[in-house]
Image: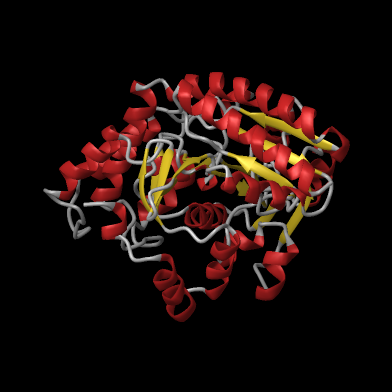
Amino acid sequence: MTNAQIAPDYQQIARTFRTNLSSGRARLADMFGGYVEVESNGAWITTSDGQRFLNFGGYGVFLAGARHPTVVAEIERQLHTHPISTRMFLEPALARAAEMLTSVTPAGLDRVHFCCSGAEAVEAAIKLARLNGRPFLISMVGGYHGKTMGALSVTARSVFQDPFRPLLPDVAHVPFGDSAALAALLEQHPDEACVIVEPVQAEAGVVLPPPGYLRSVQSLCQEYGALLVLDEVQTGLGRLGSWWGADREDIRPDILLSGKGLGGGVMPVAAAVTTNEIFEILDRDPLLHTSTFSGAPITMAAVCGAIRAIKEDGLVERAAALGELLLHETEKIIGSHLSDRNCQVRGAGLLIAVDIADPGVAGELLMDLVKNNIVANISLNSDYVLRLTPPAVLSDSDVEFFLERFEAAVRATAQGSG
């Protein structure tokens, strides 16, 4: 059976979006050429008209690609035995997933709360902070932590926050990378603060901190009795070319957040991983913070498959090597065609930004990439930054395809906006 036989045409889908879902999403789809994605495998997406697109987007979800066979096999086994539990009894898939996840997190982070999204993991971290007497939240300017009410309170961008005020009280933001500003604020709130920070600010445009910054943040938290939450929803599990951004400076946060790639590109799942001491209150009352689908066996199977795939296929090391190559080649291409546009290419591992100072040009490049069968994203907290988050399963021919099509798109953007 062909894709055209199993998928309705674009106009039918668009009508349903306008009627029953989001007309705004339909307008965006029109802008990008009017495609319906119906199949995915590895690094590739197939649309209903049979076109194939190389996936360098997906907001960081597809580190292991789409439908990695190890992940799919784990899920299929669980699907045919026990996909959703009653939560009345103990359940082995949940235990196995927790054991596997804590085997790759920094030492001492032994307790896991699973949930369905990165924003839910942030909410769990905020609740744990309050339960441990740290109600004052500090996040970084440009940080992105999700759009539920608690997570939105620490997502420091007014365009997302303003329509939903009032948000949580007792929240402050300091510049990312500025240890002195953080120290000054922590000094005003001894033993009552929770600091939430990303190792690399992905949605702000892949903003890398100065060397030693994370270690400095950890030291300041220890000095002033603050909890440190490291939001690795997008940066963790190999995306930066190391298991965690924490590993880049050999730190251990009090709470580490994981998501996106944790479901292996197949299932939506996230987690907050913490210490015995911080988790202790939830031990005393296991019903204090719960969710119906937290730790569902089918999603736990995906976690197990994702960690197995990353380990067995060497995807952390592959992300480091591919990232170095793609960063170098992307920088060369941008320098050849957009050198007069005050562009900057930066990144870590397979988290790469093309920062274009001229307004609107990043959006033009995104559209030109789609015309060349490449999917990418604009950073949610920076309209000037095109972000590339390719999977670590790229083949040599995939890389060659990307570089050829990326150069064609950049050349078209340079000519069209000149």
Residue at left 65%, top 62%? 153
Residue at left 78%, top 37%? 177
In the image, residue 402 sits, relative to residue 34, either above or below, namely above
Q: Nearer the viewer, residue 299 or 178?
A: 299
| Quadrant in which residue 241 is drawn | top right
* Location of residue 142 in the rendering, given as x and y in whole percent from the top left corner: 73, 50
Left or right? Give the position of 304 relative to 404.
Answer: left
In the image, residue 66 sits, relative to residue 145, either above or below, namely above
* Location of residue 183 in the rendering, given as x and y in whole percent from the top left corner: 80, 41
* Location of residue 137 in the rendering, given as x and y in whole percent from the top left corner: 67, 55
Q: Specify whether residue 379 is in view.
A: yes
Left or right? Give the position of 170 relative to 321.
Answer: right
Left or right? Give the position of 72 relative to 336.
Answer: left
Q: Specify whether residue 224 is in view.
A: no
Residue at left 26%, top 40%? 72
* Location of residue 220 in the rendering, given as x and y in whole percent from the top left corner: 73, 36
